Image: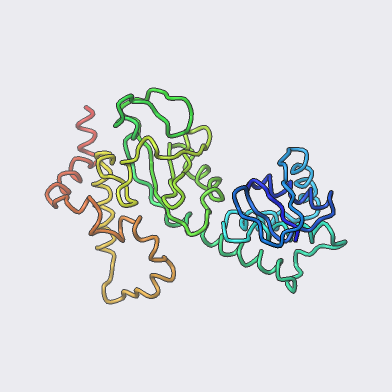
Amino acid sequence: MVIFYYDKTLEGLLSAVFDAFKLKKSPEQLLTQGDIAPLFATDIHHVETRNSKYERVQLAMTKRLANITLRQLMAVWFSELPESDHLIFRYLCKTFRSPSSIETDFADPDVLQVRQIAQKVSKECEHLRQFVRFNAINNPTHHSNDHSTHMAGGEPTASPQSEKIYFAVVDPIYNALPLTLDFFEDRFADQKWAIYDSRRQYGFFYDLKRVEPFNLLEQDDLLVNDAINSHYLTEDEQFFQHMWQRYCQALTIKERLNPKLQRQFMPKRFWHHLPEMAMSNNPTSNITDQQYRATISNNRPDNITKQQK
């Protein structure tokens, strides 16, 4: 039994494909450091990740595979399913060994499985684009003692007290967040935003110039039970959420409620992060109608004009 050990990165996986052809070996398992090799392993090879290896494989992939297939393989990688790396490995080896394209050979179980997993991850990406709800929060670093920012993972820099960030929490089944960054960067290019994956404990922050990964090690109180701490919300955010809830309540026709169809179009696992679906747990529920009417009156265009004068 041939075993390949690699570093569990995409570059390392492509380097393993390179070594398989160079050494003329076909591993039966792909393991990472710390994994115990099977009892009957007869040949163990440790893959060394190098730029020259995976770049050569990448070039061959762009020549042999269509763009849609490359996106499917990337979706399989981000699915984080067991044996997904070995599935990609087998797919690439079959592609390079076959004189013709295997992309539409759905009689091959690996080709069919790649397509099925890619469809599931693509559906999860679409759910993220549909159900992400941003909340306006004050820069969470202002609540720390040094008033420095680590959201973008860079050097600490001072921030003005009025800085506002649009923050969203997601909990996707697959690691689909990196596949949706282009959409959010294009859609919300004029404002700072951050999307945090609570299941994998990381996220991405957009600072009007670039998107960078971050974590909440310095702001561990920002989330409470996977929901944004109400102390971080801006002054207007709670009122806007209350307005949105009242709008949804007014628009709802109780006689036409269809919970089964609603769950079909909007999976229930996303409801926890939707203000309109979590009214009982939303901190804005403490706002009284009198406060609400006063806020609406103060934000009328004529009143705003008078205040500016």
Q: Does 91 sit left or right of 255 as displayed?
A: right
Query: In front: 44, or 109?
Result: 44
Q: Does 133 sit left or right of 145 as displayed?
A: right
Quadrant where the C terminus is found in the figure: top left
Q: Does 275 sit left or right of 154 as displayed?
A: left
Q: Residue furthest right?
A: 99
Residue at image coords 19%, 40%: 298
Where residue 178 appears, x then y in whole percent?
54, 48
Residue at image coords 50%, 46%: 184
Where residue 79 appears, x then y in whole percent?
57, 58
Query: In front: 154, or 93?
Result: 93
Q: Residue furthest left?
A: 290
Query: In front: 236, or 176?
Result: 176
Colour theme: rainbow
Residue at image coords 29%, 32%: 143
Q: Which of the 4 quarters of the picture holds residue 111?
A: bottom right
Where residue 273 appears, x then y in whole percent?
35, 55
Q: Does 86 sit left or right of 159 as displayed?
A: right
